[in-house]
């Protein structure tokens, strides 16, 4: 059966010995190679690999610090925090295989009630912008969802649940235009020194007070070094750095004034804005815009459709802050500025009498009083009281004839035509029209005509090209009321720790002083006071029965197709003003019809006046 | 004493009549075998502690059971005369092909490749057993044509007989095991005395085949390798891949694990690469890396030395075998062990592509452990038969 050779006692031929030796030699060489490699890895580079292994197992997990709360001047909570759970995806930990990744997306879509396609799109978009950082898929998920994801972690590779702090606005739309929003820090911001200590993915204030005072409000995120396994599952904590919560910010806002102001505007259902400010210090007591919105919609990332609606002009553009961003002619409320300019430049004295025959014709154009009334011969206080347009037309004409643009100069001096410097980002600068400005436009064919004396006449009563907002008017009235200090309006009052101890008083920007003589101030205040108190005053009817003496000026800005815009600026008490309120209501009609009654309510809230005395009847006086 | 004995005096006592009935095993091979099994169990104890929640000993207990079964089979094989397998060469070869094809035909897809047959409690991997069957059958076929060994036809026939199962295994696809099949065939031919020119020709054919698989076919739009196989082949060239699922990343983790063990290892508690699963497949393909991390250069060196001992003994047993069949069997077993050790460890330390080949006796897995012990049983049988033949001869002479 067997071939003889097979069963034969084997003889070791030299050839076989050679071949066995060769096999042994090969084995020896292979083992030597492996040994040398091991020597290199373990003995020569061991320390390096040990360090790598130690790095491997440690992951720094951010522990978010809660942002500081924001309170009003009496300590009432305006902006709070709440915790929410967010589902995040670490893109680099997702399965690389397209099919397996698709399955994870499908499961995620099912768990989060989103379409897998939307999830894929979102991850792809965010990875393009910020590779290697987690993509937040859904904020504020239910605990049930979180438990489901965690129990099935193995089926959701790369998916994480994190606890974050979200802003909560207990009073909903009250103060909405002040607070602003929070969002992830941008790469541009990270380059700025004010964001030192902020890491990619941290959330910082992106607008409003949250942006302005971000360095106080944002805390210092903590970190815990966690030992993780290859799947990223935590296996134990190695060290913790506790987060430092943000500081508490106390605003100068008076909650009652703020709430009343917003409610007063809302009653009319028209767009508008108001500012209430302490004329002595520039502390803003209330600042609001109508229509309002509930900032809670921004807390967990706003949907594009909602955001669009909040910006839509057809919807009243609720996001616009008309108190600081509005660009309106101010109507007769501007007369305070014209008066101050004329008195201080010597065009008139408080006793200068000018004749108001109901209209003034200059260069073939007739400028009429509102309501076509004639006030006869009037001096300045009376002209302010009854809001004689012709009186101020004449002053405007005189200023034009004298030259030197005194009205424009004083308008700018009193705070118009440039930002006030309020600690609320995004305020508008407005425009004080000058011959130079209009002629430049004309040269560039951007307007149909060059500057004419009529432009100055229009400006003297706050019509024409003038653009200003309630905040700027409040600053101008404050300057007259306080005898010449141009305050920088400010909302932030001080930084406190969470027990209310003062850490830092917020200093508003430098105040400018301008020279306004006592007689000028007296004449203007006399006129404003008469306007709100004495018979024939444009807002006397509105403030009838109001226990505090008010000095105020109505305004009706003619805006062509957009109708008459109602304005009112008041200072109270008239003899020593502690509050200045500027209110404007688009399409509200005469100043006495809408803005003045709204202002009465705001003043009532400030002075603690309740009941019927807080509410004035709408007047009908044209101005 | 006229009795030939190993330099280590492995306990053959020709004149001791009462001990003749006892198995005269090669004690060095036995020592290395038991040593590797022990090392495997200790390593798996750490590497698999968290793999099955609730039962940290799941894999250790199973591996121990496989080892017991394998050791029993080893003793059985050691006690019978291997020469009788020559008679069964056709049956052995046919059953090898049958088992491998059975896998292709019925086994469910596991991780994209079909290598197992499910037998209730046990997943049996025929390509593992195929290695031993191939050694037994191919050695017999070579001896059949021993006188025509210098003919080209013999070499091509033998290679063809080897290539049929090789290609079937490759189709499973199990690239690593098919490499073992080829090296076994080459080693058997080499020891049998095939001409150098034939090897040169085989080398040329192999080079042409490699070119076809790696370059020409993909260029012609017919990819013969699966993507993950290509990844594995090229991964050791690009270790900086940050993707945790890529082969390059895994290899990086393996090197980190081995390197971090330094001279004496990190110990079971602090071996984070292994314990926290940064090291992939730490109980199978990368068990050597786990040894490197746990026990350092010393531990890895001991494991390698045990393999070196086995391979040296197989070459030694080759030379003392009582017949050429035994010599070829010893050569085949030695080649099988050497290939698996070098390919697996080479992959772990980053000097070879990762081919998913188990480290004999160390990697977790019933098929691999039991088949390796069967192969060692055959090696022991060659040794026992050689010793008994020598003993009877000296008795006759005496």
Image (tube, coloured by chain):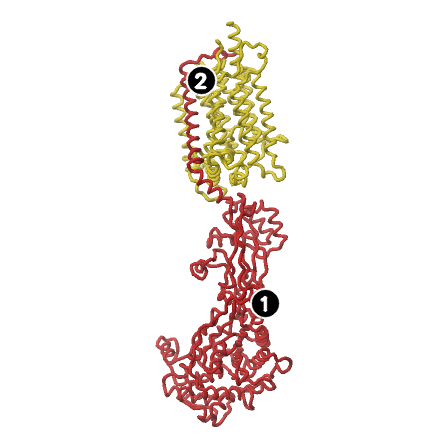
Chain colours: A red, B yellow
Residue displayed at 48% across by 20% down = B313
Instruction: From the top left corner, tell me how far across and down residue B117 is, in percent.
Output: 59, 30
Q: Tell which of A256 and B119 is nearer to you.
A: A256
Is residue A103 visible in this depiction of the protein? no
Q: Is residue A238 visible?
A: yes
**Residue at the image position 43 percent from the left and 42 percent from the top:** B240
Circles 2 and 1, Cβ within 8 Å, touching? The answer is no
Secondary structure beneath dot 1 equals: strand
Residue B49's place in the image compared with A617, above or below, is above
The residue wearing badge 1 is: A77
B211 on left or right of A283: left
Crowding at label 1, few (<14), some or many (≥20) Cα neighbours within 10 Å?
some
Residue situated furthest left in the rendering? A443
| Secondary-structure class at tag 2 | helix
Q: Name the quadrant containing residue B209.
A: top left
Check the image and report above or below for B140 versus A610: above
The mark closer to the camera, 2 or 1, is 1
Image spot of residue A415 (x, y percent): 44, 78
Q: Position of residue A591 (x, y in %)?
A: 53, 82
Circle 2 is placed at which residue position? Answer: B192
């Amino acid at each position: 059966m067997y071939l003889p050779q097979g069963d034969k006692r084997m003889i070791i031929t030299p050839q076989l010995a050679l071949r066995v030796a060769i096999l042994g030699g090969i084995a020896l060489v292979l083992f030597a190679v492996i040994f040398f490699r091991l020597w290199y890895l373990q003995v020569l580079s061991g320390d390096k690999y040990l360090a790598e292994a130690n790095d491997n197992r440690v992951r720094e997990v951010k522990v978010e610090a809660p942002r500081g709360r924001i309170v009003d001047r009496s300590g009432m909570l305006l902006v709070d925090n709440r915790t929410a759970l967010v589902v995040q995806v670490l893109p680099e930990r997702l399965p690389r295989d397209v099919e397996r990744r698709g399955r994870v997306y499908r499961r995620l879509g099912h768990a989060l009630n989103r379409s897998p396609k939307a999830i894929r799109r979102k991850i792809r978009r965010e990875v393009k912008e910020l590779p290697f950082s987690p993509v937040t898929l859904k904020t504020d998920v239910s605990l049930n969802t979180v438990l489901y994801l965690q129990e099935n972690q193995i089926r959701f590779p790369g998916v994480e649940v994190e606890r974050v702090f979200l802003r909560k606005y207990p009073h909903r739309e009250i103060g909405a235009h002040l607070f602003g929003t929070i969002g992830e820090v941008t790469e541009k911001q990270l380059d700025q020194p004010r964001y030192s200590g902020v890491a990619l993915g941290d959330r910082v204030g992106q607008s409003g007070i949250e942006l302005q005072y971000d360095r106080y409000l944002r805390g210092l995120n903590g970190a815990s070094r966690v030992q993780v396994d290859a799947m990223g599952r935590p296996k134990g904590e190695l060290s913790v750095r506790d987060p430092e919560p943000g500081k508490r910010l106390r605003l100068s806002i008076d909650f009652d004034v703020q709430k009343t102001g917003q409610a007063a505007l809302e009653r009319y259902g028209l767009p508008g804005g108001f500012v209430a400010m302490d004329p002595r210090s520039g502390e803003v007591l209330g600042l609001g815009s109508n229509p309002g919105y509930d900032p809670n919609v921004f807390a967990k990332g706003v949907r594009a459709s909602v955001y669009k609606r909040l910006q839509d002009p057809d919807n009243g553009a609720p996001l616009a802050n008309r108190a600081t961003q509005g660009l309106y002619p101010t109507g007769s409320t501007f007369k305070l500025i014209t008066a101050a300019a004329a008195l201080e430049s010597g065009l008139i004295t408080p006793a200068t009498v000018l004749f108001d025959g109901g209209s003034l014709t200059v260069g073939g154009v007739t400028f009429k009083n509102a309501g076509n009334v004639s006030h006869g011969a009037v001096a300045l206080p009376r002209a302010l009281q009854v809001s004689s347009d012709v009186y101020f037309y004449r002053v405007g004409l005189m200023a034009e004839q004298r030259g030197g643009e005194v009205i424009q100069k004083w308008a700018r001096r009193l705070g118009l035509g440039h930002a006030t410097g309020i600690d609320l980002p995004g305020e508008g600068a407005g425009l004080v029209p000058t011959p130079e400005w209009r002629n430049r436009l004309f040269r560039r064919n951007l307007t149909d005509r060059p500057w004419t004396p009529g432009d100055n006449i229009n400006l003297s009563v706050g019509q024409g090209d003038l653009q200003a907002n309630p905040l700027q008017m409040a600053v101008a009235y404050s300057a007259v009321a306080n005898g010449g200090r141009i305050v920088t309006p400010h909302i932030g009052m001080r930084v406190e720790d969470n027990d209310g101890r003062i850490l830092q008083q917020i200093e508003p920007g430098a105040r400018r002083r301008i020279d306004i003589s006592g007689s000028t101030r007296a004449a203007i205040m006399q006129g404003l006071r008469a306007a709100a108190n004495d018979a024939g005053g444009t807002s006397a009817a509105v403030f009838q029965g109001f226990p505090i003496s008010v000095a105020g000026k109505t305004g009706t800005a003619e805006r062509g197709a957009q109708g008459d815009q109602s304005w009112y600026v008041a200072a109270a008490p008239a003899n020593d003003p502690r509050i200045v309120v500027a209110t404007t209501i688009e399409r509200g009609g005469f100043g006495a019809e809408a803005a003045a009654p709204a202002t009465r309510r705001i003043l009532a809230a400030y002075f603690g006046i309740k009941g019927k005395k807080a509410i004035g009847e709408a007047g009908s006086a044209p101005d | 004493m006229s009795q030939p004995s190993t330099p280590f005096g492995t306990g053959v006592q020709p004149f001791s009549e009462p001990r003749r009935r006892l198995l005269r095993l090669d004690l060095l091979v036995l020592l290395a075998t038991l040593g590797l099994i022990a090392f495997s169990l200790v390593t798996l104890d750490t590497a698999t502690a968290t793999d099955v929640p609730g039962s940290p000993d799941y894999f250790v207990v199973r591996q121990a059971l496989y080892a017991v079964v394998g050791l029993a089979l080893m003793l059985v094989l050691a006690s019978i005369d291997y020469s009788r397998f020559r008679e069964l060469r056709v049956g052995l070869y046919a059953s090898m092909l049958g088992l491998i094809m059975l896998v292709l035909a019925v086994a469910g897809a596991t991780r994209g490749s079909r290598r197992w047959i499910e037998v209730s409690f046990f997943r049996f991997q025929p390509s593992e057993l195929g290695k031993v069957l191939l050694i037994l059958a191919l050695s017999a076929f070579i001896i059949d044509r021993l006188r025509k060994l210098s003919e080209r036809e013999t070499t091509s026939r033998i290679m063809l007989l080897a290539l049929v199962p090789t290609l079937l295994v490759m189709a499973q696809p199990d690239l690593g095991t098919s490499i073992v099949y080829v090296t076994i065939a080459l080693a058997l031919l080499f020891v049998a005395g095939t001409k150098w020119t034939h090897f040169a020709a085989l080398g040329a054919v192999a080079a042409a085949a490699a070119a076809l698989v790696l370059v020409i076919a993909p260029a012609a739009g017919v990819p013969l390798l699966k993507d993950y196989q290509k990844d594995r082949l090229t991964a050791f060239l690009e270790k900086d891949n940050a993707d945790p699922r890529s082969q390059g990343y895994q290899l990086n983790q393996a090197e980190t694990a081995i390197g971090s063990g330094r001279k004496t290892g990190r110990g079971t508690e602090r071996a984070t690469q292994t314990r926290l699963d940064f090291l992939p497949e730490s109980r199978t393909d990368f068990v050597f890396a786990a040894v490197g991390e746990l026990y350092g250069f010393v531990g890895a060196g001991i494991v390698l030395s045990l393999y070196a001992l086995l391979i040296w003994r197989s070459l030694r047993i080759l030379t003392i075998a009582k017949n050429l069949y035994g010599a070829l069997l010893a050569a085949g077993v030695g080649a099988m062990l050497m290939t698996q050790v070098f390919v697996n460890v080479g992959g772990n330390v980053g000097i070879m592509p990762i081919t998913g080949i188990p480290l004999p006796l160390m990697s977790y897995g019933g098929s691999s452990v039991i088949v390796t012990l069967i192969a060692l049983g055959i090696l022991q049988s060659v040794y026992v038969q050689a010793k008994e033949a020598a003993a009877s001869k000296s008795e006759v002479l005496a």
